[in-house]
Image (spheres, rainbow, N blue to C red):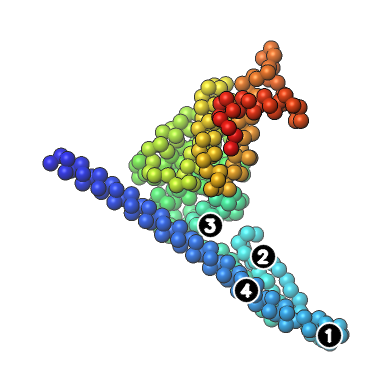
Amino acid sequence: MEDNKNDMVEKRGIEEERDIEDKKKKEDEKKEEDEKRIVDNLKTGIGVVMALFLLGLPLFNMNQSENMPRISFSFNQPQGSNPKNGLQVTVNQISGGKTSELYSFKESRMSYPSDELVESYHRMGYYEEAVSYAESVQRDIENGKIESVVRGAWINGLLADSYLELGDYEEGKRFIDNAINVYREMGEEKENYYYVYYLQGKYYLKTEQYEDAAAYMEQALEYVDHSRKKTTWDEMREAYIYCDAGIAYRKLENPDRAESCIKKAYEIVSEKMLESEIANVYYKDVLEPEIRELFHASGNGAEDGEVKEEISGESGGEKEYEQWFSERFGEET
């Protein structure tokens, strides 16, 4: 009887996981369709503009008399939108000293749900654009326009991360607290709860409170290890946590734990570099510089406790680093 009960519980868990995956798949398909619609609309609009341009060429080639009609183009940002939201193209006819509009085309993402815009801009690293929708997100949460409270908490987390990246730590902390309160009300086992622990750690790392940073990073790693089956995006976030934890431990002069965390981050990122441009950029901009920091902090070639400076172009420095890297991380990807 007990075995049957366990089987039912396991079956229910599998079904719930399938439901989550199906829902995520549908959301991804919807986003792809929306992006395709934008591209198609842009192509259509640009096609119309080009047709009008070609039709206007004869007018340009005719006698440039003030009485002859001429065509002019203007390219502007749609009113009330952010720079990356869209483009407005206006075709004007100038005749007899008067200007009249022939055609105007614009494609704007202003009508998209605020939570989707925040998520999209955050993924692309457009943090200023992401936080520009902070008030809209809060209104949509209050009005029940966002599909669930957990979804709202997740978006609050993305806004918090965006503020931290922009250096606005006070505002970032406010959104972290918003997200944490919701997750705690819903129960700590909820999906993506690890992320707010990471954001707490990131906040303390940014504000140079390294002991607190390390403690929250460890909590985040504990939760992410027990989370649902991870996507590539989730795995990259896991790499971010390990890397930032390594930075905190390096600052705390705990080289063994720092190296352990950075090595784990490298293992994740190196596996993803062939399939993800995000992984390549992250390795180049963040992870590799941190690995080199570890190399210097380890005191290689140091005398009397002083860290040997690597000189660009000096034959010994780079070779020494490569040997150290190979011993600890294996062949470089």
Residue count near mark 2 (Cα–Cα under 10 Å), binned few <14, some 14–19, many ≥20: some
| Drawn side of residue 87 relative to residue 94, left or right | left
What residue is shown with label 1? 62
Disc 3 or 2, which lies upstream in sequence? 2
Closer mark to the observer between disc 3 and disc 4 = 4
| CA–CA distance in space, label 3 to label 4 | 22 Å
Vertical side of 196 occupied by 327: above or below? above
Residue of label 2 = 77
Residue at x 53% of width, y 57% of height:
117
For mark 1, give the secondary structure. loop
Q: Give the foreground label among 1 and 2.
A: 1
Residue 243 x %, y %: 54, 34
Asked if the residues shown at circle 3 and circle 2 are in contact, with their CB atoms under 8 angstroms apart, the answer is no
- The residue where tag 4 is placed is 45
Work out how far the residue at label 3 is from the one at label 2, CA to CA, in angstroms.
17 Å
Give whichever of discs 4 and 2 has the lower sequence position: 4
Residue toward you, 8 or 104: 8
Q: Position of residue 51 (x, y in %)?
A: 68, 79
User: Is residue 272 shown above or below 317?
Assistant: below
Residue at the outermost top position? 304
Percent x, y of residue 333: 58, 37
For label 3, the residue is 117
Which quadrant of the figure contains the N terminus? top left
Q: CA distance from mark 1 to mark 2?
A: 32 Å
Front one among 285 and 316: 316
Mark 4, mark 2: which one is toward the viewer? 4
